[in-house]
Amino acid sequence: MEEKNLQQSANTETKGASIDKLDLDNMSARELLALQEKINGLNSQQNSTNQQQNAKVDSTALVVATMNKKSVGLSFILTFLFGPLGLFYASISRALIMIFFSIVTLAFIIGGGVSSNLAAGGFGFILAIIEYILCLVFSVTCVNSYNNELLNMVTGKE
C-alpha cells in the first residue's frame, strides 16, 4: 500500500502537479525518503542541463565574436583605394573627421591654384599626402582596437 502511495505521489509530481497536492503528513518515513531521492534526482538532472546550456552559450559567444571581427587587410585596402571614404569600414567617426580635413586640404589646393600662389598650393599637396598616410594608419589601428575590445568583451577582461 505504501509503495502505491509513493508511485502515485511520484507520478503526480512528474506530471507537473504541485507538491501541495501531496499529503506529506500521512506519508511514512520510507515514502518521504523515496520522494526526497526522486526530487534530488530531478535537481541533479536539471543542474546538468543548465551546465550544458551554459556551455552552449559560451561557445555561441565565441562564434559570434569570431563572426563580428573586422579584417585589417580589407580595411587597409579600402582606405588605400578610397582614402577617407574607406575609413567608414574601420570607424565612422574617424572617417567623418578625415573627410572634414580633406575638404580643408582641397580648399588649400584650389585656393593656391586660383590665386597662383605656389606656396598655398604646395602646402595643400603636402597636407593631402599627410592626410592619406594618416587615413591608412587610422584604418589599421581602429580595426585592431575594435577586435581587441570585442575579444575583451567575450573573455570578460577590461
Image (cartoon, rainbow, N blue to C red):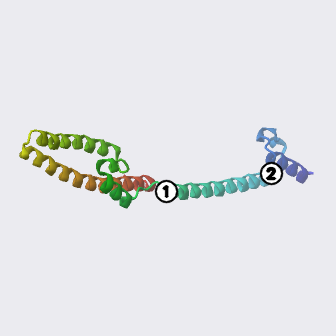
Q: Secondary structure at mark 2?
A: helix
Residue 67 is labelled as 1
Residue under numbered circle 2 = 29
Name the amino acid type tagged 2. Answer: Ala
Residue occupying the point 75% across, 55% down: 37
Q: Position of residue 80 (x, y in %)?
A: 30, 56
Please give left or right for residue 98 compared with residue 19 in the image. Answer: left
Comes first in the chain, label 1 or label 2? 2
Q: Give residue 18's quadrant in the image.
A: top right
Residue occupying the point 79% across, 43% down: 16
Q: Visible in this render: residue 157? A: no
Q: Give residue 157's quadrant in the image.
A: bottom left
Q: Position of residue 73 (x, y in %)?
A: 36, 61
Q: Give residue 51's quadrant in the image.
A: bottom right
Q: Nearer the viewer, residue 107 or 58?
A: 107
Residue occupying the point 33% across, 47% down: 85
Q: Secondary structure at mark 1?
A: helix
Q: CA distance from mark 1 to mark 2?
A: 57 Å
Residue 80 is labelled as none
Give the answer, above or below, for where 19 lies relative to 30.
above
Please give left or right for residue 39 compared with residue 68 in the image. Answer: right
Determine crowd level at label 2: few under 14, some 14-19, many 20+ residues with C-alpha closer than 10 A.
few
